[in-house]
Image (spheres, rainbow, N blue to C red):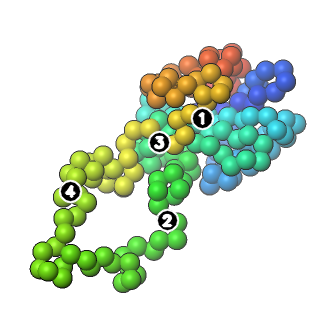
Amino acid sequence: MYFAALLARTEDGWEASDTELDDVETLSDLADLAREATADYDDDTVLVFIEQEDAWFGVVRVDGEEDPRIYVSDAAAAARSSYGEILLTDEMLGRDPDDEGADDLDALDLDGTEDGEPEASEAEADPDAEAEAGASGVPSGPLGDSEILADLGVPEKDLLGLESGDALSEIADILGAAEVLETVR
C-alpha cells in the first residue's frame, strides 16, 4: 500500500493535497506535478511525501524551478518498488546513464594480468560491499540529501533516525503540518 501527498508551504502555512502517481514515470514528471499542483505558490517550497507501508519513505523537495532534492529512507527497499524507482536516479546511485555495460571492449579493465597475477576484484577486497549493495547494486539504508529538511526544523540526525511507518507524520508534526497531512491520508 502506497501513500503520496504534496505539502506546499505558503504565506498562510502548509497546505496538503493527496496525489496520484499513476502517470508519473520520472523524477522530472514528479517535480512538474509538484509545481503544477502549487502553481499559485511559484517560489514556495513543495514537499512530496511518498511511503510504502512500513518498508520505506521518501521526501522530494521542490523549491521553485531548482532541481528537486531527494531523500529515501531505504534505497534497497525503494528499488523494489515502482514509485521508489522514480526517486532513485542514476546520479543518486552513482551510475553513468550513458554506460552501456561490458559490451564495450574499451571499457574492460585488463590490468593486473600482465605479470600473471590477477588483481583482486572489489568483492574480494571488501566482501561486505556486495552484501551492502544487494543484488541490484542499490545500497540498503538511507540515500540522498539527508539535510533536505534541516532548514525546516528536521536536522539530518533526526531524519536519519526516523523509521518507516510513522516517519511522514513525525516530519509533518515538526513542520507544523500534521493536521493538514492527516486530512489527506
Q: Describe the element under mark 2 as helix, strand or loop.
A: loop
Give the mark nearest the N terminus, 1 or 2. 2
Residue annotated with mark 1: 148
Q: Nearer the viewer, residue 18 or 76?
A: 76
Residue annotated with mark 2: 96
Q: Describe the element under mark 1 as helix, strand or loop.
A: loop
Give the mark nearest the N terminus, 3 or 1. 3
Identify the amino acid type marked 2.
Asp
Mark 3, Cα crowd under 10 Å, few <14 / some 14-19 / many 20+, is many
Instruction: Name the residue at 85% across, 24% down.
Output: 11
Give the mark nearest the N terminus, 4 or 3. 4
Instruction: Name the residue at 26% across, 79% down.
Output: 110
Q: Position of residue 118 (x, y in %)?
A: 16, 73
Extreme-front residue of the structure: 115
Give the mark nearest the N terminus, 2 or 3. 2
Q: Describe the element under mark 3 as helix, strand or loop.
A: strand
Residue annotated with mark 3: 143
Instruction: Name the residue at 72% across, 35% down.
Output: 46
